[in-house]
Image (cartoon, rainbow, N blue to C red):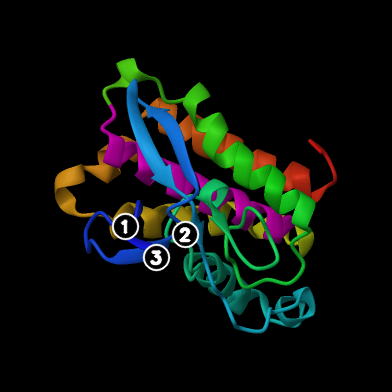
């Protein structure tokens, strides 16, 4: 095993454990990057949909935002696995179908390149901030639809976007980046995609 800085942890620069034998070469804004597969561990008992369905409406929105926000992944879901899943968002929610999670984890990383181009002058760190926010929006939208709480989708997406906007160091200018049309287009796609996968589409 080897220690490698977390792809997400731009501000705090923590370390995560990775598997040396699993490496991925990807292109970020025209620049070749080597990403390491991150094997996450999450020993917590998964929370079921019934737990959230029993909540009052006023409690549901912050609960779902926090559910997604507390994910233990330190790399994009496309490069993160658990003992049970080959690709995972590491969200503590039992009712995520393994096939759905695999589909979304792949799309949330691979698809972003269709919206964010090298000519957009997005730095690699800003690019990964967009990836993380898009992932959170996608899995959050999926869970919201699974719970049949679509009337709260916009508020949940707004909460996740705000939390992602605030998580990065100021010098990265993430609020400005998130306001670009390219980022807005990607986040909207992630929201729609998460809902549609929950509905049994795009599989």
Mark 3 crowdedness (10 Å alpha carbons): few <14, some 14-19, many ≥20: some
Is residue 202 shown left or right of residue 38? right
State whether residue 123 is above or below residue 43.
Answer: above
Mark 2 crowdedness (10 Å alpha carbons): few <14, some 14-19, many ≥20: some
Which residue is most to the left? 171
Q: Nearer the viewer, residue 79 or 10?
A: 79
Among the 4 quarters of the image, the one containing residue 180: top left
Q: Which residue is under mark 2?
A: 159
Q: Residue at x 68, y 71 (%)?
A: 93
State whether residue 168 is above or below residue 43.
Answer: above
Q: Which residue is under mark 3?
A: 17
Under circle 3, the secondary element is strand
Residue 4 tag number: 1
Q: Position of residue 46 (x, y in %)?
A: 68, 78
User: Which range of residues does the magenta coloring cover?
Assistant: 122-145
Q: Nearer the viewer, residue 85 or 46?
A: 85
* Distance between the alpha carbons at the discs numbered 2 and 3: 30 Å
User: Disc 2 or disc 1, which is closer to the eye?
Assistant: 1
Sequence-wise, the earlier of marks 2 and 3 is 3
């Amino acid at each position: 095993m080897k220690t490698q800085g977390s792809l997400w942890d731009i501000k705090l620069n923590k370390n995560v454990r990775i598997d040396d034998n699993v490496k991925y070469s990807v292109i970020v804004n025209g620049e070749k990057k080597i990403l390491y597969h991150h094997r996450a561990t999450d020993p917590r008992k998964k929370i079921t949909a019934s737990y959230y369905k029993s909540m009052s409406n006023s409690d549901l929105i912050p609960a779902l935002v926090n559910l997604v926000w507390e994910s233990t992944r330190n790399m994009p879901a496309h490069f993160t696995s658990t003992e049970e899943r080959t690709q995972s968002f590491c969200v503590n929610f039992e009712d995520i179908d393994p096939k759905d999670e695999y589909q979304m984890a792949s799309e949330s990383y691979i698809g972003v390149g269709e919206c964010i181009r090298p000519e957009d002058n997005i730095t690699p760190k800003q690019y990964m901030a967009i990836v993380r926010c898009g992932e959170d929006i996608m899995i959050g939208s999926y869970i919201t639809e699974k719970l049949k709480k679509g009337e709260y989708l916009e508020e949940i997406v707004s909460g996740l976007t705000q939390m992602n906007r605030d998580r990065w160091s100021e010098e990265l200018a993430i609020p400005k980046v998130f306001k670009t049309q390219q980022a807005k287009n990607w986040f909207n796609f992630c929201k729609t995609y998460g809902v549609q996968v929950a509905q049994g589409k795009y599989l």
